[in-house]
Image (cartoon, helix red, strand yellow):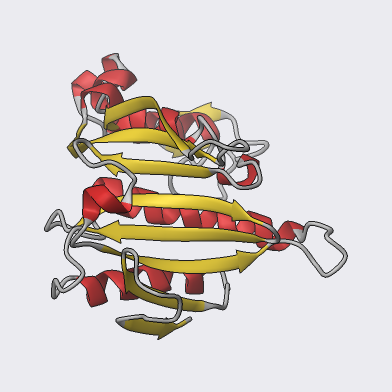
Amino acid sequence: MEGCEHIPGRCACEHHETCECDQCEAEAAAAALPAAAVASPAAALPDPAALPLARKWVVWISRPPAKGSLRTNEICGSFATVADMWGALNFVRVDAISLGADLCYFAEGVKPTWEDNAKGGRWMVGVTITNTAGVLIPANVTAARATWETICLGLFGGSFDDSGEAVGVVASRRGSIYRLSVWTRDCHSPTVLPLGERIKACFLEQRLGGRLEYAKHGADYGDTIHTITV
C-alpha cells in the first residue's frame, strides 16, 4: 500500500488492522507456498518438455504442383510433448501459408492423403479473409488464426477427441479463403458429429460465421454427410 511503512503484521498507517503494503503481501503469498517452491519457484512448475501428449504428431507442408508435376507432401518435423507442440504451432502461422499450399498436422503413421484415409472424411469450413477488392480483412485473419490454434490445441491435448478418431488438421489458402479442416478415421463413426459441435464452438468463440460440412474423402462436391451452421 502506498505510503505505508513496512512493519510485519501491523499497518503503520493505521488504515487497516493488518499491513497491506506490497512487501507484506508478498511475504504472505510466499508463506502460503510449499517450501520447495519458495526455495526454487521453477521446482513448483512442471517442465513442458516432460509433459507428453497422448499421441505423436507429424508436421507436413503440402505444396501446389508445378506445371506438369504432382502435388508434393513434405515432412517438416514432429512433436510428442507440450513444449514441442508450441514450437510446431509457431513454426508456420496459419496466416503465413502461401496461396495454394496446405499446413498439416497428422497423427504419426497417417499421411495427409485421401488414399491413406480411404474410409475417412473431414469436417471443413472456409473463412473469407479478403474483401471484393482483394484487400485483407485483419479481423477475419486474426479470428481465423485464433480458431485454428484452438482447434489444434483441442485435438493435440485430447479435449476434442479422446477416442483417436480425429487423425489430422489441415489449413489451406485458396484465393480469398482460409479453409480449415479436421480429418477423421471413419466417416461413419458416431464420434464424428460431436467432433463437429466442438469445432463449431471454436468458431462461435471468435464470432465467425460459416457452414461446417462433413464429407467422405473423394465425395462429389455438395455430397455431404453432416452439415452444421455456425
Q: Which of 183 and 66 is in front in this view?
A: 66
x, y (%) of residue 9? Answer: 39, 35
Above or below residue 200? Residue 217 is above
Residue at 57% of width from left, 78% of height from top? 209
x, y (%) of residue 55? Answer: 18, 39
Task: Mark yes or no: residue 148 visible.
Answer: yes
Residue 174 horizontal side relative to residue 190, left or right: right
Q: Quadrant of residue 195?
A: bottom left
Q: In which quarter of the image is residue 196?
A: bottom left
Residue 24 horizontal side relative to residue 190, left or right: right
Residue 163 horizontal side relative to residue 39, left or right: left
- Of all residues, the one furthest to the right in this rendering is 133
Q: Which of 47 and 166 is in front in this view?
A: 166
Residue at 16% of width from left, 74% of height from top? 188
Q: Quadrant of residue 34?
A: top left
**Where's the N terminus, which quadrant?**
top right
x, y (%) of residue 28? Answer: 36, 35
Residue at 64% of width from left, 40% of height from top? 96
Above or below residue 87? Residue 102 is below
Residue at 31% of width from left, 53% of height from top? 114
Residue 104 horizontal side relative to residue 119, left or right: right
Count of numbered marks: 0
- Of all residues, the one furthest to the top in this rendering is 39
Task: Mark yes or no: residue 158 visible.
Answer: no
Q: Which of 26 and 113 is in front in this view?
A: 113
- Of all residues, the one furthest to the front in this rendering is 68
x, y (%) of residue 150? Answer: 43, 55
